[in-house]
Image (cartoon, grey):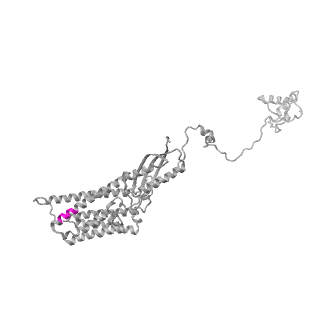
Amino acid sequence: MEPTKASSAAQPPPTLIVDDTDASAQPPPNQLAHKASLLSSPGSCFLSPSSAMSADGDVGETAPEPAAPNPFNFQTQVISTSPVKSNIGQRRGHRYKHSSISTQHQIFQEPPQRPPPVLPASLPIPTLAEAWKSMHRDQRTRLYWSLCHLAVAVFIFFRSEGSLAAMALSHLVFFDAGSAALCVAVEVLGNFEVWRRSSIRHPFGLERVEVLVGFALSVFLLFGGFDLVSHNLKHFLESLGDHEAHHEHAHDHVSAGSIDLVAAVAIVSTLVSAYGLRNHARIAKVMRVSYLAALPSVLSNPFHFLTLFFSALIALLPLLSISLYTWLDRLICAVISIAMFGLGMRVAIAQGLMLLMSYGGSNGDSGVTSVLREIELESAISRVEEAQFWQVHYGLCMANLKVSVSKGCDEMSLGKLRNRISSLIQNRLGEGYGTGGSIRWEVTLQTNTDAGS
């Protein structure tokens, strides 16, 4: 046994042999069982052929055994190096959501996407510097003349001492100068987009500002009329009795040169404003008087007529006697005050209706009633449920109608019905309180099918 020990002591350390044979070659069952027992034992390992033992346990020359096949059947796999696509952010069931089955079972439908708003939120309002730069030569001329017209009114007011009629005439010229300034401001603001274009902040542009300023001028007429009445009444009461007046008033003959100068200045300024500026063209329809419509264009305006007529009458006052002069002077002042009060009330009512979004055109309620009666006579309309007529500003009116139609009306019939109603309203009510010409009407028609028909 010693040779055995010597050979065992001199043998090299065991080495692990990995077999590269094909795993598809199946070994006999007895060899597989033997290898499985070797692998299951903790101290077992594959030894080199030099240290292999014989079948009877003696150390010696061993016959080479066939190479054991690899018990692992691993297969080579190729791994791609392309970037990995992530599914993060994808909605599960996206295709199912838009399928016809999903649409049938949805309780809350998503609202349709609204188109972008056509109207801007707001438009820039011009400053004084921008307005000055945008003015044309004609507009600058009108502005300079409105300042001169205001200076004429101040001149007449300070030269009216001793004449109530001349003071009343200065009130008329003041209103004329204010109308000229308003006309210039409207033309300058018309150079900008914010004046006519609608926005969310100003649905009808800034044209309603003109109505507001015109309402302020009508209030000036009312207060001017009250002021003239108070002055005339005070002078009348002072002339009664034997007491002395608190203020000395010169009721003697006023110099003919002073009165003639006042009358001439008033006539010239009125004619320049009427022919050159047309300062009352913006509110001519509001102040229209039926019995003056047959007169020429200048005299058809009641304020131009009053200014020219009383200026010519005041120029004749110095030719009268003192007593007749005094009574005629008071009478002219009273007539001018009544005219200012009446016209101021008329303008205030007309423009107040515009500010309150109502309609008070030339025919008023009678015109609207006749239009509604003709609309109800349409064969396709069974009844008119709601009707609203109102004027936005001097150039635009609105009509909102809600009618019931019969069941047999199709889209083509409804389109023709809308056109007929729009034409009817435009033709019958187009002569409202406008700015020299017909007013543009915007008609909105809402139809409901009559269940009883």
Q: How many marks?
A: 0
Image position of 261 with respect to 376: above or below: below
Q: Position of residue 435 (x, y in %)?
A: 39, 61
Q: Is residue 431 left or right of residue 94?
A: left
Quadrant in which the N terminus is drawn:
top right
Picture coordinates of residue 46, whole percent (x, y): 81, 33
| In the depicted structure, whether residue 333 falls above or below residue 91 | below
**One can see residue 173 in this view:** no
Q: Nearer the viewer, residue 15 or 416?
A: 416
Q: Residue furthest left?
A: 242
At 30% from the left edge and 68% from the top edge, which residue is drawn?
A: 269
Left or right: 40, with 441 as reference point:
right
Give the side of residue 66 with respect to residue 133, left or right.
right
- x and y, in percent, of residue 380 in the image: 49, 48
For the record, the magenta segment spans: 325-332
Closest to the observer: 448 or 161?
A: 448
Q: Quadrant of residue 159?
A: bottom left
Within the magenta stretch, is there residue 163? no
Residue 7: image location, x then y, percent: 85, 32
Taking the magenta stretch, the answer to whether it contains residue 329 is yes
Q: Is residue 192 above or below residue 257?
A: above
Magenta span dominant secondary structure: helix
Is residue 232 visible in the rendered image? The answer is yes
Using the rendered view, name the quadrant where residue 283 is placed. Answer: bottom left
